[in-house]
Image (cartoon, rainbow, N blue to C red):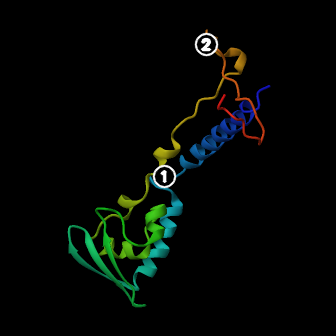
């Protein structure tokens, strides 16, 4: 009778419960960003000692690593050829090396998804379908299933 509504309701219930759990855990954070980020910072700071960053201008750097790798990093554009930083915005050791060179706060470039504000949002629960407002519009129905055979529509 309602094949799509039940999975939708289950998804909403799961998201509401997860957001409530996250909101409770976020209230214990001492900073605006999560504690996991600071643990990653500490690990990457130690590894950043293996890189030398040379400041060019306007937050652009050339980073040389002891293994011979060279990177061009633009902090204004928040990108360079390290896929980890581009995809998940957790600062890698090369970016940390650049930011330490210019005494830039590491928290400034962390993605918004790791902040308290992200988990502060609320998804309101839904009423059951009986409580929904009745309208004069015709209800939506699923399209007719024609099977795998093609129907000739030239008639």
The answer to which of 49 and 149 lies nearer the viewer is 149
Residue farthest toward the top in the current orientation of the protein:
136
Q: Which residue is pictured at 36% across the width and 66% down the height?
A: 79
**How many residues crowd around disc 1 within 10 Å: few (fewer than 14), some, or many (20 or more)?**
few
Residue 81, picture quadrant: bottom left
For residue 113, the mark is: 1
Residue farthest toward the front in the current orientation of the protein:
155
Residue farthest toward the bottom in the current orientation of the protein:
67
Q: Quadrant of the N terminus?
A: top right
Answer left or right for 141 relative to 33: right
Total labels: the figure holds 2
Q: Secondary structure at mark 1?
A: helix
Q: Which residue is pictured at 48% across the width and 48% down the height?
A: 116
- Where does label 2 land, which residue? 137
Residue farthest toward the right in the current orientation of the protein:
1
Give the answer, above or below, for where 106 lies relative to 94. above
Which x, y percent locates residue 3? 76, 32
Which x, y percent locates residue 127? 67, 22
């Amino acid at each position: 009778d309602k094949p799509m509504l039940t999975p939708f309701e289950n998804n909403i219930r799961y998201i509401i419960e997860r957001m409530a759990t996250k909101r409770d855990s976020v209230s214990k954070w001492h900073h605006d960003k999560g504690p996991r980020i600071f643990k990653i910072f500490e690990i990457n700071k130690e590894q950043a000692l293996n890189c030398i960053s040379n400041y060019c201008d306007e937050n652009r750097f050339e980073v040389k690593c002891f293994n011979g790798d060279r990177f061009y990093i633009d902090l204004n554009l928040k990108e360079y050829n390290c896929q980890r930083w581009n995809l998940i915005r957790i600062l890698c050791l090369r970016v940390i090396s650049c930011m330490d060179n210019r005494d830039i706060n590491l928290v400034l470039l962390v993605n918004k998804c790791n902040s308290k504000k992200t988990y502060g949002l609320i998804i309101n629960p839904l009423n059951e379908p009986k409580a929904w407002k009745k309208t004069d519009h015709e209800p939506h129905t699923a399209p007719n299933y024609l099977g795998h055979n093609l129907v000739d529509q030239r008639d």
